[in-house]
Image: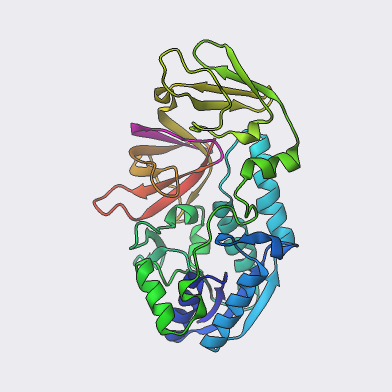
Amino acid sequence: MRVLAAMSGGVDSAVAAARAVRAGHDVVGVHLALAETPAALRTGSRGCCSKEDAGDARRAADVLGIPFYVWDFAGRFAEEVVDQFVADYAAGRTPNPCLRCNEKIKFAALLDKALALGFDAVCTGHYARLSHQADGTAVLRRAVDAGKDQSYVLAVLSAEQLAHAMFPVGDTPKARIRAEAAERDLAVAAKPDSHDICFIPTGDTAGWLTERLGARPGPVVDALSGAVLAQHTGVHGFTVGQRKGIGVDQPAADGRPRYVLGIEPVSGTVRVGPSEALDVHEIVGERPVWAAGRAPVGAVECVAQVRAHGGLADAVAELDGELLRVHLREPLRGVAPGQAVALYRSDPAGDIVLGSATIR
């Protein structure tokens, strides 16, 4: 097959490309330039997609002996990921930019261009696995390394996108991937993993948002008594389930900590209260995507996941018109609008992705 290897400049994508070469595929490496000022996108291990990363990707491609290109996707990334991230926070939602980047950039813009150029698949360093059913349908599964599993942020992919995807490192623990990179003389073998949001390398999300949205003051209100406890400078500084940084000086009457329970962007109100008020028994999702390409019929027993790592509960999911209703058998906390709920098959392994929806 002709394979386009997306090379971020990290160890995972470098080994993924190496494995595609070893499998006998005709591989071309590509690094995505996602920012107009790439030098500002990395501080140590924070962020990614910098000039440093592009250079690391090029050197890895040279070692592998494959052609290498840099494609400018900065405009598309700004529109589809960064601008949407800002708009979501302004509307009181908590977006997941990595999930949207996979959906809109790596497996939409990049895959579309790859297919137009005659490639058969896009290969990435995501920790997930693909298997195939008897009819050839691709099945997305959790990675072997549970601590690195990225199937949650890939659950937004459609059946057509999965049919043209390759995840060569998903069957291997991360420690072994680093060892393999060293064995292949890849200089990125010991490179630190990037973390935080790639376009906010300082890690100060609230400060970054304030620069773009400005001060939008409003009250912090006790959800039980209705009393105004404090004033804040913008709802974009809060997310459901947050405990620290709420700005309330006086303790609750029972002495227990308060948590953010809800955000009302129109009035600018942030509601806070006790931890048990965070319990969610039903999730309503919009824009459902089904990994098999078709929606299930009737109610489906499944496992729901609401965060990239953790936040799992047995559930029953069913479509209600264009919405997905997920009834949780035990409550979950920290469920924030704008995040995704991913559904996994309810079986002993529990590693097969059924689909996902955006939490409304």
- Up-down: is 184 above or below 245? below
Which of these two is toward me, 8 or 30?
Answer: 8
| Residue drawn at x 47%, y 64% as measured from the top left | 126
Say if the magenta span includes residue 218: no
Say if the magenta span includes residue 329: yes
Tell me: 325 left or right of 346: right
Residue 113 showing in the rendered view: no
How many marks the image carries: the answer is 0
| Residue drawn at x 56%, y 58% as measured from the top left | 102
Where does residue 31 sit, x and y in percent of width and height? 62, 72
Residue 182 showing in the rendered view: yes
Where does residue 189 sit, x and y in percent of width and height? 46, 75
Q: Quadrant of residue 212?
A: top right
Where does residue 171 sit, x and y in percent of width and height? 35, 68
Which residue is at the far front? Answer: 249
- Up-down: is 317 above or below 227? below
- Up-down: is 62 above or below 105? below
Which residue is at the far bottom? Answer: 65
Which residues, given as a range, are shown in magenta? 323-338
Quadrant where the C terminus sits is top right
Which of these two is toward me, 308 or 217?
Answer: 217
Secondary structure that dominates the magenta span: strand
Which of these two is toward me, 274 or 307?
Answer: 274
Where does residue 242 sit, x and y in percent of width and height? 50, 33
| Residue drawn at x 39%, y 39% as measured from the top left | 317
Tell me: 217 left or right of 187: right
Q: How is the image coloured?
A: rainbow
